[in-house]
Amino acid sequence: MFLLKLLARNAFRHRIRTFLTILGITVAILAFGLLQAVVTAWYAGANASSAARLISRNAVSLVFSLPIAYQERIRRIEGVSSVSYANWFGGVYITEKNFFPSFAIEPKSYLDLYPEFVLAPEEKRAFFQDRKGCVIGKKLARRFGWKIGDSIPLKGTIFPGNWEFVVRGIYSGAETSTDESQFFFHWQYLNESLRKTVARRADQTGVYIIGLKNSRAAAEVSLAVDATFKNSLAETLTETEKAFQLSFVSMTEAIVVAIRIVSFVVIIIIMVVVANTMAMTARERIGEYAIFKAMGFQAHHIAGMVFGESLFITSAGGALGIILTFPVARKFGQLMGDFFPVFQVERSTIYMDLVFCLIVGIVAGIFPTWRAVRIKIADGLRRVG
């Protein structure tokens, strides 16, 4: 306790300088935490993927669809436990700025494959029974103030026209990483309309979701699915759900790399700032260190004082930065919910914050400690007064 009191008094001799240094560390740790949270949000879909699910799409491109008749053939493949399908709808609510992920799905099989979408039994039954019914995420409902029974008009982009839906269920995520901003409705509702308007686009789906009996058989089942439709008019490309999600991330890989680099550059910059502060402190106290030496203090005592002060400053700034990261990240996630449906600070980010605070404190204290330890008593005493 006495040691901490001594370190605190030493650190706050120059209060303005120390406060500014702590503020700099706080801002750096806060910036690092937010940037890492952005990277985590970028990979949220991949991180939330299940090892027991495969995604099968058209081998040419995701833009091209697959015949609905493939479902039964996939179901008969060894290792497949269940099959569902989904179409990206791409509708907007009133104006283009009100965009959110919307999918036409086969309700029962899809929800069975995605137990992370938690829906009340009565809401699930109501959704199954209403062809125009839809299920929306809790975050999406909060965003637009939608309630059970509300009528929702969407304007189609990929599938032109005005589409009417009725909210029959609001799901919540079983995990914090579950996306609660999605919109699901009956694939049959979409297909019936296409049969009347654009018959050539009917009886098609965008992707198949394949449930596995054993997640370790993912590679074998993927190859079997693709082999089944090899040389057909619509060949398939089947991969794990995580690989499917990562294929979207790879399109913006350069942005993710840039964000990672910036987050580490911030830490390096603050390391230089703290090192400069400690160098100034050591230079001002050369006379004091000489007196300590003359009184019999050893090199490790002097080193402990310098390193202790450096670690005290970085720890104070780091603690404030970590504490502020959570409310700031929560507010940032609310403001950027349209772009990052899942935005949270991972535990690993906090661990990195703590490690970086320790590294910055140690590195910043190396040169001042070396200088203080090597000073000769006579040279140091000349500076007293």
Image (cartoon, rainbow, N blue to C red):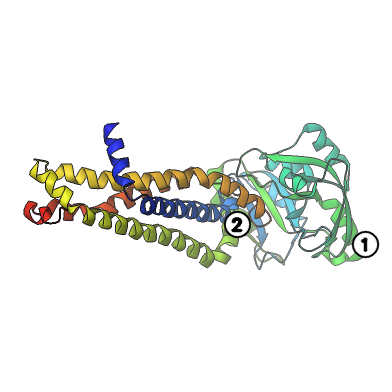
Q: Is residue 6 left or right of residue 238?
A: left
* Nearer to me, 179 or 73: 179
| In the image, farthest residue toward the front | 385
Marking on residue 196:
1
Residue drawn at x 90%, y 58% is: 193
* Nearer to me, 49 or 55: 49
For the N terminus, which image quadrant? Answer: top left
State the image coordinates of residue 380 (x, y, percent, origin top left).
Answer: 12, 54
State the image coordinates of residue 91 (x, y, percent, origin top left).
Answer: 80, 59
Q: How many marks?
A: 2
Q: Label 1 is placed on what type of residue?
A: Lys
Residue carrying label 2: 244
Asked if residue 216 is positioned above or below residue 92 in the image, the reply reads above
State the image coordinates of residue 328 (x, y, percent, origin top left).
Answer: 57, 49
State the image coordinates of residue 302 (x, y, percent, origin top left).
Answer: 17, 45
Element under disc 2: helix
Asked if residue 374 is positioned above or below residue 50 in the image, the reply reads below
Residue drawn at x 85%, y 56% is: 190
Residue 375 seen by the camera:
no
| In the image, farthest residue toward the right | 196
The quarter holding residue 70 reads bottom right
Q: Label 2 is placed on what type of residue?
A: Phe
Badge 1: how crowded within 10 Å, few (<14), some, or many (20+)?
Answer: few
Element under disc 1: helix
Q: Is residue 346 left or right of residue 49?
A: left
Mark 2 and mark 1 lie on one chain; the one further toward the N terminus is 1
